[in-house]
Amino acid sequence: MSTAEQRLFPDWEVSRWFNADAPVSLTDLRGQVVLVEAFQMLCPGCVSQALPLARKVHQMYGGQGLAVIGLHTVFEHHDAMQPHALEAFLYEYKIRFPVGVDQPLEHSPLPATMLRWQLQGTPSTLLIDRAGRLRAHHFGSIDELELGVVLGRLLAEDGIAAQPPGPVVHSADEGACTPAACPAPSTGR
Amino acid sequence: MSTAEQRLFPDWEVSRWFNADAPVSLTDLRGQVVLVEAFQMLCPGCVSQALPLARKVHQMYGGQGLAVIGLHTVFEHHDAMQPHALEAFLYEYKIRFPVGVDQPLEHSPLPATMLRWQLQGTPSTLLIDRAGRLRAHHFGSIDELELGVVLGRLLAEDGIAAQPPGPVVHSADEGACTPAACPAPSTGR
Amino acid sequence: MSTAEQRLFPDWEVSRWFNADAPVSLTDLRGQVVLVEAFQMLCPGCVSQALPLARKVHQMYGGQGLAVIGLHTVFEHHDAMQPHALEAFLYEYKIRFPVGVDQPLEHSPLPATMLRWQLQGTPSTLLIDRAGRLRAHHFGSIDELELGVVLGRLLAEDGIAAQPPGPVVHSADEGACTPAACPAPSTGR
Amino acid sequence: MSTAEQRLFPDWEVSRWFNADAPVSLTDLRGQVVLVEAFQMLCPGCVSQALPLARKVHQMYGGQGLAVIGLHTVFEHHDAMQPHALEAFLYEYKIRFPVGVDQPLEHSPLPATMLRWQLQGTPSTLLIDRAGRLRAHHFGSIDELELGVVLGRLLAEDGIAAQPPGPVVHSADEGACTPAACPAPSTGR
């Protein structure tokens, strides 16, 4: 097995998908940066922090070389977090990116992918680069600025971003001072 | 003048520096990504959002190929925002990165750099790449994830980041479920 | 029926209790101010705002003339919000005040108490005074200051708060200026 | 001196007022609950927490038996916090309630009222009841729910609130589930 292949991150094992017309695999996503959010629908930190951030990443950068995938890694309260309950949860929380149910195992409270990837709990955020290699793995809540910097770095590894774009100019609303900004008097600009 | 030189972003004009042993210029910072935060000490959006974010960027990434520079661009309430007041402000708000006072002009309420750069007000956040070119310019409050992604992209433009680092693994505390995370039962890992 | 009785707010109808040794009734709580939080475990606004606030009220004022009662008023996704799922939810979210399951009805998606009280949805917050009368009814997220003022008014209606207490003096930590406070230099106090 | 008089809280000593047509005294405000916010314009905790909360109290309850008074108790950086700077600050932060400048003293860094009231620093929040007695005194940031409960209790001490008002009913918007609330299906109400 070649060195490069050895470094490929192993795929997930999923029993059922939501928000996807067909099963998704890491291999299918090669060429994109992939953010995997491993969560449980009854994990408070997942609901209040990790999933809203994954949703924001998906809304702002999904389809721009970045894929966001949810993985429902149930390791406790199995009866309360069956797929039909997850479906209601995804609907109410307006989660639109693909979410896979981590394959349950008969003799383990932890599901298959969770064991394979040695996840420590939920939420766990994993970042896989365009070449399929694991580049970041974080258990617990993640800082938004730090996640952005890592994403920006991984997105830049595309071999085609040579030419700098012109500066991006955004503006606040004009007029009087607001809580967000104080516009300057016009100077004929 | 060559094309490359034309695209260099013009330097600031500063009458006095705080948190710096000697005057700083954009030219001195060539090779680093530079985040310039143009602010006024009595601008609510600067105090509540832009400066805390600039401070966070400085604490997390300062000295890692990134420089954060504050620019006090006073265009109103000039009497209340003189350098001695700014000094007290920087002390109380624990701002440690270099801050320059934008050069006041006799016949304009707007100071010199603000005019030169055509800033629309405060806060204005500018990002200058390692080659000295303006790459982003934002007036008003800025989203933390978005700022992170742009910073990550600019930091990756160093020509030396070819080899992927091993995955970064962070962990939440072990033990019972917390508001931030639910640790899984140990499986002999 | 007497006027006074007419104004009494009708009791809830509950099929099962959590966090309670025995069934609880509004009549049992006469003499206390009662905050009822009607919620669903898969309602995002309940999870992010109403329940944390009810929990805070319970932690700060529970047992001081105030009772906090949760009411699980399931009107959608019935399969996903059965009592065993609610039990896991209450455990993970560390909700310790009594929570009753609003009695399901055969021919209505809305449960019995929800119909009786004409609730508009979840979260709904109801405040019942010491005499058993409904005094406030709010659908949607509630402002913390406003809730506090209403609670304070209702708690003051006890006929025994005649003597003013001495002033309550709280202190921030001493020492240098913090994000929260600037201590003054000592003056021999 | 009578017992009652001894318990009256001593008045402030102010050199200049903003947002007031004429000097204000505690005696003038007898009959109202008075919230005094002692602050400095360059105190981070005052700007980020105490003043926004005082402003919110003023907007929601000002003129309903409650007066909010700011007191600029400068004890450091005196040159940077002169009245003309305070004026610009109050304008930019849209503070509309009366603000008095605590009388500076020649031989003390602490101003007159701060010494008289033995304030420990800024922010300090004081609550004076309708009879002119100090009822709460808090140094540092204050919890919004707790402030509400104390305000509600003090506002209820008016001797005229005997009859309970009808229930206050507020509603969230109708329609689909939002981040704030899930409306129930209509049942002919």
Image (cartoon, coloured by chain):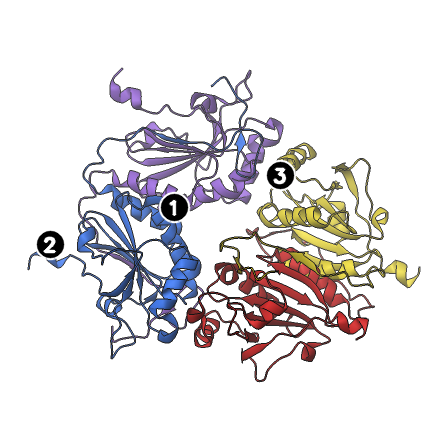
Chain colours: A yellow, B red, C purple, D blue
Q: Which residue is mark 1?
A: C145
In this picture, residue D122 sits left or right of residue D34: right
Q: Are marks 2 and 1 on the same chain?
A: no
In this picture, residue C145 sits left or right of residue A145: left
Picture disc at residue A93: 3
Quarter of the figure with residue C88: top right
Q: Chain of mark 1?
A: C
- Residue B170 can be seen in this image: no
Picture disc at residue D93: none
In this picture, residue D156 sits left or right of residue A188: left
Q: Which residue is mark 2?
A: D4
Answer few, some or many: residues within 10 Å of disc 1's Cα (few below 14, many 20 plus, some between 14 and 19).
Answer: many
Q: Are marks 3 and 2 on the same chain?
A: no
Q: Nearer the viewer, residue D48 or B78?
A: B78
The kind of secondary structure element at disc 2 is helix
Viewer-nearest of labels 1 and 3?
1
Answer few, some or many: residues within 10 Å of disc 2's Cα (few below 14, many 20 plus, some between 14 and 19).
Answer: few
Q: Indicate the amino acid at tag 3.
A: Tyr
- x and y, in percent, of residue B70 in the image: 57, 71
Q: Are marks 1 and 3 on the same chain?
A: no
* Residue pictured at 50% horizontal, 42% vertical: C49
- x and y, in percent, of residue D108 in the image: 26, 77
- x and y, in percent, of residue B172 in the image: 61, 58
Q: Indicate the amino acid at tag 2.
A: Ala
Q: What's the CA distance linking mark 2 and mark 1?
A: 31 Å
The kind of secondary structure element at disc 1 is helix
Q: Is residue B98 above or below residue D136?
A: below
